[in-house]
Amino acid sequence: MIQFDINPRLEGDSLFVTDLPLCAVRLMKDANYPWLLLIPRAHDLIEIIDLEPDKQLQLMREIAQVSEALKVVTTCEKLNIGALGNQVSQLHVHVIGRFRDDPAWPGPVWGAVPPETYTPDKSEHLIAKLRDQLSG
């Protein structure tokens, strides 16, 4: 496994789920939404175009894999996927499950409401289900 540093903000705001061939997958610590991050394990990446073409394709495959797993596990109605990087420049992709009754619907999740902390049981249960889905 490639050793790399995760930006302290990304690390502090999320919990480890699993490692895929290219990306570390992490669960954001906001129980308002099922929200995953994919962080490519490489140094000095800011944009998707900073990846070699084969790694760009691998990232797209992993985004699709994680999106499918999140949809199966949570039965979310919509997926929001984005690589913004305005607050943290390290390349990372957000995959967010959305529901018509979530606190930010239909707007963006950022800043809509204060983050809701997961209980340890709830986060561990969700992570276990995601790991199971991603390993199958």
Image (cartoon, rainbow, N blue to C red):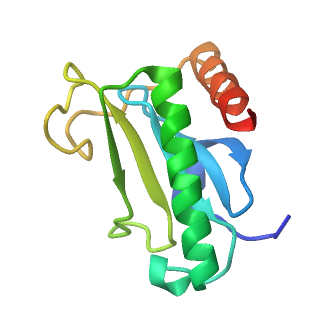
Q: Residue furthest right?
A: 1
Q: Residue furthest left?
A: 106
Residue plotted at (27% across, 24% down):
99
Residue 55 is at least partly visible in this image = yes
Residue plotted at (81% across, 70% down):
3
Location of the C terminus by quadrant is top right
Q: Quadrant of residue 98?
A: top left
Q: Nearer the viewer, residue 60 or 94?
A: 60
Q: How many marks?
A: 0
Q: Quadrant of residue 21?
A: bottom right
Residue 25, placed above or below residue 119: below
Q: Nearer the viewer, residue 72 or 43?
A: 72
State left or right for residue 18 relative to residue 104. right
Q: Quadrant of residue 18?
A: top right
Residue 38 image point, x, y percent: 56, 55
Residue 37, placed above or below residue 53: above
Residue 10 image point, x, y percent: 53, 56
Q: Residue furthest top?
A: 121
State left or right for residue 117 relative to residue 120. left
Residue 57 image point, x, y percent: 56, 70
Location of the N terminus by quadrant is bottom right
